[in-house]
Image (cartoon, rainbow, N blue to C red):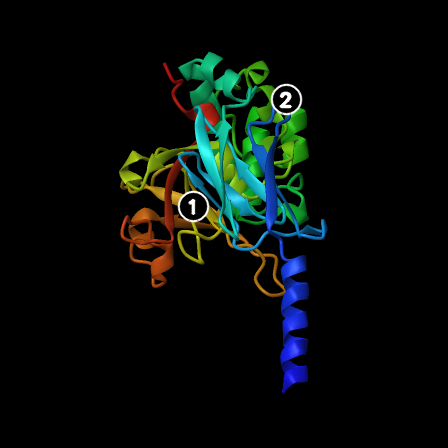
Amino acid sequence: MKRALAAAGAVLAAAALLAPVRHRVRVERAEGNPVQRIRLESRSLLGLARTAWFASAGGDVPAWGGAREGFFAAPTAPGRVRISAWPGFRRDVALTPSADPGAMPAARADQGDRDAFRRWFVAILEAQLDGPSPAWEPAQRDCAGLLRFAFREAWAPHTEAWRARTGFPGSPVGGDPARELAGPWAQAFPTPDGWNAFAKGAYLRRLACVDLGRDTAAARPGDLVFFARGGPRATPDHAMAFVRPDVDGQPVLLYHTGPEGSAEGEVRRVRLDELLHHPDGTFRPVPENPAFLGVYRWKVLADPTP
């Protein structure tokens, strides 16, 4: 018994020496990246680098991530993130918005450019119902990939060469938006690692869009809805886009199913009134559905802040 107690005591002592009990935080910023990373560096009493236990982030600036990869935030106004970790560590980190070149084009674009972008974005989405564009990479064919593809191609010069490259079947939908106003948005999206051609749905929602709330009546063609299948705290893993309304005026959405087993999936069209009665309640865009994350609008389409 004494040996067992001694062995248990030795194990506990070793665990205490190895536990992450010393913490410090540092903020990483990069020019032109609206996302800031808060690193939580933790060490044991022996000075060994360890991952913090029970780490979390709170405060008045929304943050996401974890102790291993760091916490991320994209403040739009000065605020604080509180980092907590076992045993009793608390640190308030003051953040200010990074210079975001992506915010500038929307502020300079007039309503005509925003309307032109919206028309082309919707037309390119609708064209995918007849089959995916040859310019849309197969590896990118999912719900977020559909949005990224239509977004980028909406900024392109819509010439005959562009039609041949993309296989766009329809007639021109109007003038092009002024490409010089797109800034980095023409080729990339903001992510925690900077502007990147690939951005998952979570980053599109948090960093490329503005929140319009949870009332679908606020949506216009070109606006988006996001759902979190795992609940409101999960990473959103499904997105849809509003397109032109049906002949009776009922709003319509498009989405890509994503890969289904061995099948690649497909682009589908659904009326809003059908979606509101979807047999799977997690896909109903209603305020009482915790998996419905709301209606969003691309930043480049949002009205400039006065």
Q: Amino acid at mark 1?
A: Phe
**Residue nearer the viewer, 145 or 296:** 296
On the image, the x and y values in percent for residue 59 come to 41, 38
Q: At 28% from the left edge and 40% from the top edge, which residue is drawn?
A: 215
Query: Toward which corner of the image does residue 3 lie, by quadrant?
Result: bottom right
Q: Which of the marked residues, 2 or 1, is nearer the chain's N terminus?
A: 2
Residue on which the image places disc 1: 226
Q: At 59% from the left edge and 14% from the top edge, which residue is drawn?
A: 180
On the image, the x and y values in percent for residue 207 come to 51, 33
Q: At 54% from the left edge and 32% from the top edge, which residue is drawn?
A: 151
Q: Residues within 10 Å of mark 1 (few under 14, many from 20)?
A: many
**Which mark is on residue 31?**
2
Query: Toward which corner of the image does residue 10 lie, by quadrant?
Result: bottom right
Report the side of 50 relative to 104 (left or right): right
The image shows residue 35, relative to residue 238, as above or below, that is above
User: Does the rendering let one see residue 39?
Assistant: no
Q: Residues within 10 Å of mark 2 (few under 14, many from 20)?
A: few
**Residue nearer the viewer, 249 or 71:** 71
Spatial CA distance of label 2 from label 1 is 29 Å
**Which mark is on residue 239?**
none
Give the structural element (helix, strand or loop) at label 1: strand
Q: Amino acid at mark 2?
A: Glu
Please state, as top left, top right, bottom left or bottom right, where the N terminus lies in the image. Answer: bottom right
